[in-house]
Image (cartoon, rainbow, N blue to C red):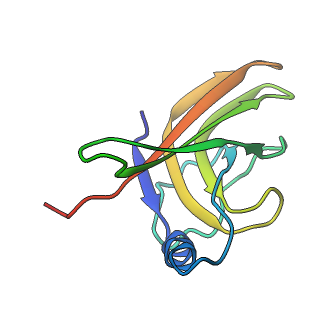
Amino acid sequence: MADVVKVVNGGLAIITNRMVAGGTEPKWVDWGTGTTAALITDTDLEFAAAEDRATGDSSRVTSTVENDTYQVVGTLTAVAERAITEAGLYDAFETGNLFLRGTFSVINLNTDDSVVFTIKTAFSDGS
């Protein structure tokens, strides 16, 4: 479970762009070792790890009301020992815009260990 998760300002731009049929879907998952809590002003992970971003599988799921949640599931595999403390969701494989960043308690990984990230963005009426 993440400690802090924020749809960042760039993520808000992605949402509105997609609503007018523009832009690309944020479905690329990345991880890193940054420890500064996620902020809405973040534009990237604090310290991205060396692994390539993973293309996640996206879907709409139900949290409260049918199809109110955008979900991406992606698997990353460590190429070396890592102490992962952050994850992000981007709208492109290499460069791209950060949609969401989360920070969490350390996940210690050995070479070839994998983590399956399930990233959910739930939309609600604010109540």
Image location (x, y in percent) of residue 59:
53, 44
- Specify whether 5 is left or right of 106: left
* Residue that appears at 33% across and 58% down: 123
* Residue that appears at 68% across and 42% down: 56
* Residue that appears at 78% across and 46% down: 53
- Please identify the quarter of the rendering in which residue 2 is found: top left
Is 67 above or below relative to 24?
Answer: above
Disc tally is 0
The residue at the far left in this view is 127
Quarter of the figure that contains the N terminus: top left
In this view of the protein, which residue sits in the foreground, 111 or 121? 121
- Specify whether 62 is left or right of 38: left
Is 105 above or below relative to 54?
Answer: above
Image location (x, y in percent) of residue 36:
52, 55
Image location (x, y in percent) of residue 74:
66, 36
* Residue that appears at 56% across and 73% down: 18
Quarter of the figure that contains the C terminus: bottom left
- Please identify the quarter of the rendering in which residue 101 is found: bottom right
Image location (x, y in percent) of residue 50:
84, 44
In this view of the protein, which residue sits in the foreground, 40 or 123? 123
